[in-house]
Image: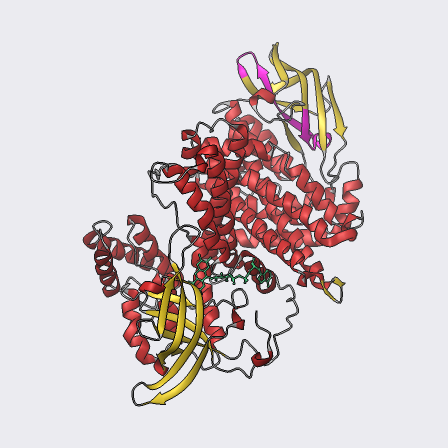
Amino acid sequence: MADVDTSQTPDADEALAQEVRSWLAANWSGAPVDAAGHRQWLAKVVEARWAVPRWPAEWGGRGLPDGQARIIERAFAAVGAPGSGQDRTNLWANTLLAYGQPELKQKLVPRLLRGEVGMCLLYSEPGAGSDLAGLRTRAERRSDAAHGDHFVVNGQKVWTSNAATAEYGMLVARTDWDVPKHQGISFFFCPMKQPGVDVRPLRQVTNESHFNEVFLTDAIVPAANQLGDLGQGWSVLQTALAYERSLMGEQARGPRSGAAESTAEEPLIALAREAGKLGDPLIRQELARVVAYKKLNALNTARAKADLAQGTSSPIMSLGKLAMSRILHEEARLRTALLGPESLLEGPGHPRAEDANFLSLNAYFTSIGGGTDQIQRNIIGERVLGLPKEPEVDRDVPFRQVRGG
Amino acid sequence: MATLAREERLAFQDQVRRLLADRSTEAEVRRTMELPAGYDPSLWRQLAELGVVGLLIDEAHGGTGAGPMELELVMEEVGAALLCGPLLSSGVLAAGLLQALGDADAQARLLPRIADGSAIATVAITGTSGTWTPEGVAVTATAAGDGWRLDGEASYVTHGQNADVFLVAANAPDGLAVFEVATGAAGLATTALPTFDHTLRLAQIRFAGVPARRLAARGGAWDAVEQALDLARVALAGEQAGAGRRVLEFTVDYAKTRVQFGRAIGSFQAIKHMAADLLLEAESAISAARHAAQALAEGAPDRDASISLAAFACADAFSTITATAVQMHGGIAFTWAHPAHLYLRRARADAQLFGTPAFYRDRYVQQLGG
Ligand SMILES: Cc1cc2nc3c(=O)[nH]c(=O)nc-3n(C[C@H](O)[C@H](O)[C@H](O)COP(=O)(O)OP(=O)(O)OC[C@H]3O[C@@H](n4cnc5c(N)ncnc54)[C@H](O)[C@@H]3O)c2cc1C
C-alpha cells in the first residue's frame, strides 16, 4: 500500500462528513410539500455537487471513490433528504452519461438530475418480453431538410410504465435485420411528445393505469439521440437493466393507503397485534420468517456495498431483485393470513384489506417487471455461478429468419 | 469484546483455511469421525498453536485475545472443512463461560490449559429435555462441608466423553450456579451418545453425589451461561454459513461437469434455478452470521435480535442447501462415499444444538417487540 491516496484518509472522510452535514443543516428543512418543491430541492443538491459525487467535476460530480460517496449518501439518509447518490440510482442519467452523444448529454443530464424530465422505458413488445432481443420495432435512418439526420420508428411497445407523462422514452429498436438478434439492435432517447407516438393506458390488476401501450408510427428520433454505436444497443441495454434491477432489489412500493404504519415497529408485528394473532405460535413462526427475509436482504445489500467500497465486486448485487420478489409475495401472503375473511373486502372503509390485497397483486411488479424471477434465476445461474447456457435455437441466425410469437 | 484489525482478521482466517485444507480433508474427516474420540489430537495441537483453540481467551491467560468477529470467520472455515473436534465445547462454550463468570481463580487454573489445548473442557447445561434454558437444567447442587455435591443428569453435552473438565449448570438452594467437576470424580458416569452426525460427539452425564467446586459469578450465573451460549450461537451460525457455501460450491461444480441428454445438467433450468435460489440462501447466511458477530462484538442495540436471526436463518439455510444439493446430484449423493451426506448430517445436528430454529424464530419476534 505504497501510494495511499490522501483523499481517502480518515481525516478527509471526517472533513467531508462535516461539510455535508453542515450544508444539510443550513439547507434542508424537511420534505417539500409538492412536486415543484421537490424539484427545487434537487436543483439545490445538484448545484452543491452532492447529487453525483462519484462523477467527474465537469458533470457536476466530485470524482470521489465509492467509500466517500457513501458518506454523503448516509448523511442525506440520516436526515431523510433525497437527491444524493444519483450516480448509483438514476438509471436515466447514468445510461445517458455512459453512452450518449455530447450534445444530448449537455442538454439532458443536468435536467435529469434535477428531476425535470419525465422518462419511460420502451423495451417490451407484445412479442418480446423475456426474450427482449426478439423485438420487432423498426428504426430506419433518414435524412431530410425538415428533421436533419434522424431515424423513423415504427412498431408497438407494451407495459410501458409512465409513458403518458414521459418527455423521453429509452427505446430499443431493430436497425439491422440481417444479423443475429442481439446484434441488430440500437438504443435511443425517443421524444414522446410528437404525433408519431400514441400512448394508450392499460388498466392494471391493481385497478390503476400506470402502464400503457405505445404505438410508434413514423415517429421521429434525431440521430443525435442515439446511445452507443449503431447495432450495439444490446450492451447499452445491459447497463440500463443493471441499474434498474439493482434498484428493484433495494426498494419497492409499500401499501397504497400509506395508512398509519408506525416506523418504530415492524409493520407486520403491529398488524399481528391489531389482528389479535400475535400470540398464535404458528403466526409467530411465519412472522419471524418473513421479517427475516426483509432483514437478510438489507444485510446482503449492506454487505455488497461494503465489498464494493473495498474494491471487490459482489455476487450479492444480482440477488437483490429475486430476494425482494420473495419478500413482497410472502409479506402479502402473511398480511392476508393475519386478516382472514377481512381480506374479502375492499374500499376506503377497509384500509387493512386494501393494503393486503393491493400488495398481493403489486408483488408481481417486482417478480415480472424488469425481467421475471425465472429470467433472474437464469442470469444468476449463468453469470454469477457460471453454469452453461440453455441452447438457443435462434441465437446465431439472421433475425429475418427467426420465428416470431 | 476484543476485535482484531480487519487485515489481521482476514490473515488469520486465511491461515486457518490453509491448515484445514491440509489437515481436515474429506479423507481425514472420514478417518477421524470413526475414531472413538472423534478428533485428531495432533490437529488439535496445531489448532492450539495457531491460536484457534484459545481464540477468545485473554492474552493474559495464554489466548489470542480475539472476539466474536474473528470467531465467526474461523468457524466459516471450520464448517467448510467439517472439522471434527471439541473447538465449540472447549474453545467457545467453556472458555466463554469462564470469562463471563469472572472467577479469577478458576480462570487462572483453567484458561491457560484450554488455550494451549492440553485440557479439554465442556459445558453441561441441559438435561434430557434438550432446551438449553434455565428450565432445562436437571442437576441440583447441595452444600456438603466446604464444598458441594451434584445430583441429576445432563445430556447433549458436546464432547463430554473427551472432557477433562466439566462446567456444570446446576440448581443450588440459592439459585442457579456453575460448578467445576473433574473427570474421574466419584459418582460421575459419562455415557457416549450415538450421534446421527458422525463428526459430532455427544454425551450424557449422570451425577450421583459428585463433589464439585462452585465458581464465583460476577453477574448472575445464568447471565454468564447466556453469554457463553451467545458466542456458541455466533460460532454455529458461522459454521453453518461456511459449510453451506462450500456445499453450494461443489454442487455447482458438479452441475457444470455432469452430462445428461448431451449437455451439462447445470444448463437445465430445473437445476440452474435451484442453484440460484441456493446462492441467495448461502449469501444470506453469511450476511446474518457476520452481522450477528459484529453486533455481539460491539454490544449493539440489536445484538440479541441479530443473534436469534442468525441462529435460525443460518440453520435453515444450511439445511435447505444440503437437502437440495443431494437432489441436484442425483444417485451419487445417496452413496456413503459422497461427501454430501456428511454435510447433511452436520446441518441436521447444527439445527438442533443450543435451541431449534422454531425456538429462535419465536424469540426473534419477541425481541422485535412482539
Ligand atoms: C407492473 C409492470 C411494469 C412494467 N413496466 C415496464 C416498462 O416500463 N417498460 C417495459 O419495457 N416493460 C415493462 N414491463 C414488462 C416486463 O419487463 C415484462 O412483462 C417481462 O419482461 C416479461 O415479459 P412477458 O410479460 O412478455 O412474459 P413472457 O416473456 O412471455 O413470460 C411468460 C412466462 O414464461 C417465463 N419464461 C419466459 N422465458 C423464459 C426462459 N427463458 N426461462 C424460463 N422461463 C421463461 C417467464 O418467466 C414467465 O413466467 C412491466 C411489467 C410489469 C408487470
Above or below, B190 relative to A21: above
Q: Residue at 40% across / 33% down in the picture?
A: A270
- In the picture, the quarter occupied by the C terminus of chain B is top left
Q: What x and y, as percent, mark residue A137?
A: 46, 75
Above or below, B94 relative to B245: above
* Left or right: B209 in relation to A123: right
Q: Nearer the viewer, residue B209 or A232?
A: A232
* Left or right: A42 in relation to A273: left
Q: What x and y, as percent, mark residue A33?
A: 22, 51
Location of residue B86 by image quarter: top right
The residue stretch that appears in magenta? B155-175
Above or below, A209 relative to A263: below
Q: Is residue B133 visible?
A: yes
Q: What x and y, as percent, mark residue B227?
A: 52, 31
Residue B165 shown in magenta: yes
Residue A101 shown in magenta: no
Q: Residue at 60% across / 79% down in the picture?
A: A401
Above or below, B42 relative to A141: above
Q: Residue at 66% across / 41% down in the picture?
A: B347
Q: How many marks?
A: 0
SS majority, magenta:
strand
Q: Is residue B2 visible?
A: no
Q: Residue at 71% across / 50% down in the picture?
A: B327
